[in-house]
Amino acid sequence: MPDTNAGSLYVVATPIGNLDDLSARASSVLAQVSLVAAEDTRHSARLMRHLGIAPKMISLHDHNEGARVAQLATHLANGEDVALISDAGTPLISDPGYVLVRELRAGGYRVIPVPGPCALVTALCAAGLPTDRFTFHGFLPAKGSARRGRLEQWIKAPETLVFYESPHRIRDTLTDIAGLFGARRVVLGRELTKTFETFLDGDAGTLLEQMTADPDQARGEFVVMVEGAPEVEKSSSDIDAEALLGALLAEGVGVKQAAAIAARVLGGSRKSWYARAQTLKDGD
């Protein structure tokens, strides 16, 4: 177990486009830590130059993350603070870092989040879709059959669906959404916080037409947000079922006979109605 003099890992959110979105706290942390673990050190070097700092950096990406854990733990054990950043946005959100954070926390090291930009939150707050419930699914599979299979799982989901997509697959993804979700509303957040930031709004078929008319609308990184399925109201037969079973039991009809009556009147198996009637009786 590391002692109280061990360093901390700071998980630092960095801009997704506009460099002015970096918080003062994040700037201060990056300037003070002993080491910055970056997804791509060449990419992050531009941010450091913008800040006027030159911290020591090492790479941490999908292909070397596991091997970096022991190395970074050694720095922390020696009392050095380390910052984790991704190419853009909040680390771990469809970016590397989960393995590192999991292992360092398991080892007793302190992990400190430094919040800031995140593409999915940025897109949602300006999309005009419900945000009281949403699910984030990262990047969809690249292969069409796998992508359609994944989308099919969410057709009946009532919450707003959010995922990321790349420019070379956005048309294929919209084609799949059009085929599976029909006229469901879709909002695309493109090039967020950058010069050509755009929100496209409509059903998937309409958005495809817009991209055909203006191919520039298919460029850049996308946050795709799909309206949730409409809530299915409880059917009158379900409501009547509870009332019917309750009335029969209140009149002294046995559970078995009440189940038989419900099956004749409302359909379904006697076994399932028996279970529901028994539950009602036990509840009394």
Image: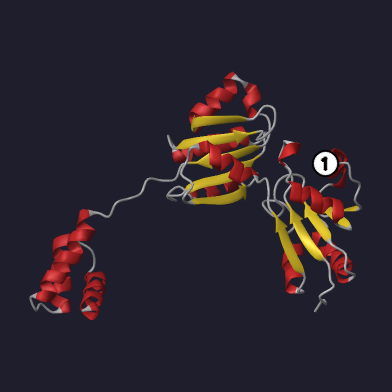
From what the image shows, is residue 210 above or below residue 163?
above
Residue 187, how many percent across, how many down? 52, 35
| Residue 119 vs residue 55, the one in the foreground | 55
In the image, residue 252 above or below residue 151 = below
Q: Looking at the image, which is closer to me, 177 or 5?
A: 5
Whether residue 251 is visible to the viewer of this picture, yes or no, is: yes
Q: Residue at x 68, y 52 (%)?
A: 115
Going by the picture, which residue comes out furthest to the left? 251
**Image side of residue 3 versus residue 143, left or right:** right
Q: Quadrant of residue 72?
A: bottom right
Q: Residue 210 location in percent, x, y? A: 55, 23
Q: Quadrant of the N terminus?
A: bottom right
Which residue does the numbered mark 1 point to in the structure image?
Answer: 47
Q: Residue at x 63, y 47 (%)?
A: 141
**Residue 229 locus on image (x, y percent):** 41, 46
Which residue is painted at 57% across and 31% down in the image?
199
Q: Amino acid at mark 1?
A: Leu
Q: Where is residue 58? Give x, y as percent.
A: 88, 54
Of residue 4 and residue 56, the one placed in the foreground of this image is 4
